Image (cartoon, rainbow, N blue to C red):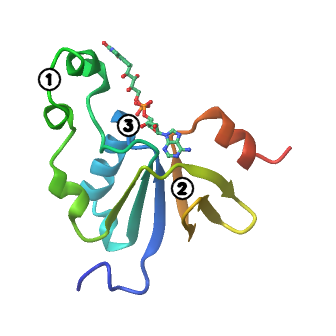
Amino acid sequence: MNSELASDLHNLVVIGNGMVGHHCVEQLVQGGALSRYRIHVFSEEPLRAYDRVHLSEYFGGRDAESLALGDAAFYQQAGVILHLGVPVLEIDRARQKVITAQIQIRLTYIMALPPPSLVKKCVPR
Ligand SMILES: Cc1cc2nc3c(=O)[nH]c(=O)nc-3n(C[C@H](O)[C@H](O)[C@H](O)COP(=O)(O)OP(=O)(O)OC[C@H]3O[C@@H](n4cnc5c(N)ncnc54)[C@H](O)[C@@H]3O)c2cc1C
């Protein structure tokens, strides 16, 4: 069954598509998470995950695609939805929603590789 069409899939949201976020999604997929979850990955950057350690080589002329982590097809498979250029503005724990300027997603699980400002917003005072 096409996992995107399955109605009983839960939303698993990963915030950040850096080196850690990318590895995290790879591990989830390898572990069979797509049978239970639709994985939404949010990145405020316009390009998919790249090798930040070698970022300085980009300024020496290395092309962006060669720095990218994994294959582009990885983020095109059913069940993995990569939202590029979409910063998460807030995690509304009470309503169980991840909020961006464009969409709100009802979530089941969240893996935030969190910027401190986002954590402050979602942790009750
Ligand atoms: C030039 C350079 C050289 C380095 N060299 C080394 C090295 O030699 N050895 C080493 O161990 N480390 C090195 N580092 C550090 C290493 O790159 C970082 O430790 C690593 O990238 C951290 O990965 P991360 O996925 O946790 O965070 P990041 O790579 O920072 O990724 C986090 C991602 O989340 C996104 N994000 C943040 N907030 C939001 C939001 N609200 N909504 C959506 N997206 C969001 C960010 O835009 C970013 O894309 C280097 C870093 C740089 C810049």
Q: Position of residue 106 (x, y in %)?
A: 58, 71
Asked which quadrant contains residue 23, the reply is top left
Residue occupied by mark 1: 62
Q: Is 32 placed above or below 27 here?
A: below
Q: Quadrant of the C terminus?
A: top right
Disc 3 beta carbon < 8 A from ligand 1?
Answer: yes
Of residues 57 and 70, the one nearer the viewer is: 57
Task: Give the amino acid at mark 3.
Answer: Gly
Q: Residue at x 65, y 33 (%)?
A: 116
| Disc 3 from disc 1: Cα separation | 19 Å
* 54 left or right of 44 in image: left
Give the mark nearest the N terminus, 2 or 3: 3
Per the image, the residue denoted by label 3 is: 18
> Which residue is denoted by mark 2 in the rendering?
110
Q: Quadrant of residue 39?
A: bottom left
Of 53 and 6, nearer the camera is 53
Q: Which mark is residue 105?
A: none
**Residue sitting nearer the eye, 52 or 93:** 52
Q: How far across and down, in percent of the image, does residue 85 sit?
A: 43, 49
